[in-house]
Image (cartoon, grey):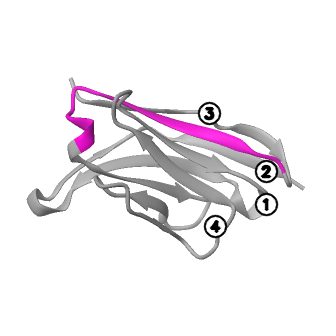
Amino acid sequence: QVLLVESGGGLVQAGGSLRLSCAASGVAFSTYDMGWYRQAPGKQRELVAAISRDSSTQYADSVKGRFTISRDNAKKTGYLHLNSLKPEDTAVYYCRLSIATVNLEIWGQGTLVTVSS
């Protein structure tokens, strides 16, 4: 069974930090590109950060210098380190695995991050 489980969300004050995890099972994790997305209330889901199979990374301008994406293929787990959090970072954060060449994607259920001012 293919499963992605995010964890690590919660309530944090502005300026604080969190580490989100995305644990995969039932998939060859190392063969997938991975991305973290977020969706705030009333807004569209947006890409926050992505890391390719060869660990190339990219970030949304709004989180550059504050968030760091990483992956541990041996543990089949991806991470998103969130630092210097702002109230506008409040959203449900989703993990996505994908292989673009075969149009394959897998989504997790999301984890809520709430940043208080």
Label 3: which secondary element: loop
Mark earlier in primary sequence (1, 4): 4
Instruction: Name the spot of residue 87 as percent of width and height, x first.
Output: 79, 59
CA separation in Å, label 3 and label 2: 13 Å
Label 1: which secondary element: loop
Mark identifier at residue 40: none
Work out whether residue 64 or residue 115 is closer to the camera in this orientation and state it. 64
Identify the residue under disc 2: 115
Occupied quadrant, residue 15: bottom right
Quick one: quadrant of the N terminus? top left
| Mark 1: amino acid | Lys
Magenta stretch, residue numbers? 16-30
Mark earlier in primary sequence (2, 1): 1
Q: Nearer the viewer, mark 2 or mark 4?
A: 4
Mark identifier at residue 86: 1
Q: Residue furthest left?
A: 102
Left or right: 46, with 89 as reference point = left
| Mark 2: amino acid | Val
CA separation in Å, label 3 and label 1: 17 Å
Label 4: which secondary element: loop
Q: Are marks 2 and 1 in contact (CB under 8 Å)?
A: yes
Identify the residue under disc 4: 63
Mark identifier at residue 8: 3
Q: Nearer the viewer, mark 3 or mark 2?
A: 3
